[in-house]
Image: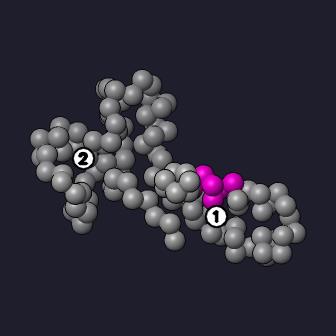
Amino acid sequence: MKRFKGTKGKWSVEEFNYVISATPNSNIQREGYHDEDELSLYGGYLIAENILSSHDAQLMATAPERLRVLIGMTLSMKAHPDYHLGKNQEFVDYVESAEQVINKALGHD
């Protein structure tokens, strides 16, 4: 199964200046990451800052969760008989489109 290899933890938005950070997970070690001042300042690992709108920030902050859901839905759809039998071309096209988006998000395009 394809996995998200980005910054682990729950991504959240600080409304003051649209900063996105991920809550650190004690089980995850980021390579070369030892800046405790940044962790305390942002409450987690800094993902992005100076985002121009709260809408953009919310979209970015929910990206890992949306990716996880899309992967799960795609796996479920691929198990459906209509996908295996090719009975519904629209269904098959949606699965293929979802896989392309997943691959692009994971850097496999």
Pointer 1 local density, CA inside 10 Å: few below 14, some 14–19, many at least 20: some
Q: Which residues are magenta?
A: 97-102
Q: Which amino acid, mark 1?
A: Thr
Q: Which residue is mark 2?
A: 44
Direction top: furthest residue: 52
Q: Residue at x 69, y 54 (%)?
A: 97
Which numbered disc flags the more N-terminal residue, 2 or 1? 2
Q: Residue at x 23, y 39 (%)?
A: 42
Residue 12 placed where, x, y %? 36, 43
Pointer 2 local density, CA inside 10 Å: few below 14, some 14–19, many at least 20: many
Q: Residue at x 77, y 70 (%)?
A: 83
Is 22 one of the magenta-colored residues? no
Task: Using the image as rendered, state which of residue 32 and residue 52 is in the foreground.
Answer: 32
Residue 15 - label: none
Please, what secondary structure does the residue beneath circle 1 have? helix
Q: Quadrant of the C terminus?
A: bottom right
Q: Quadrant of residue 91?
A: bottom right
Residue 87 appears left or right of 105: right
Residue 2 placed where, x, y %? 50, 66
Asked if residue 66 can be seen in this view, the reply is no
Residue 81 appears left or right of 12: right
Direction front: furthest residue: 109
Residue 74 - label: 1
Q: Quadrant of residue 24?
A: bottom left
Structural distance between the alpha carbons of marks 2 and 1: 31 Å
Please, what secondary structure does the residue beneath circle 2 have? loop
Residue 75 placed where, x, y %? 62, 69
Most common SS among magenta residues: helix
Q: Which amino acid, mark 2?
A: Gly
Residue 60 placed where, x, y %? 45, 40
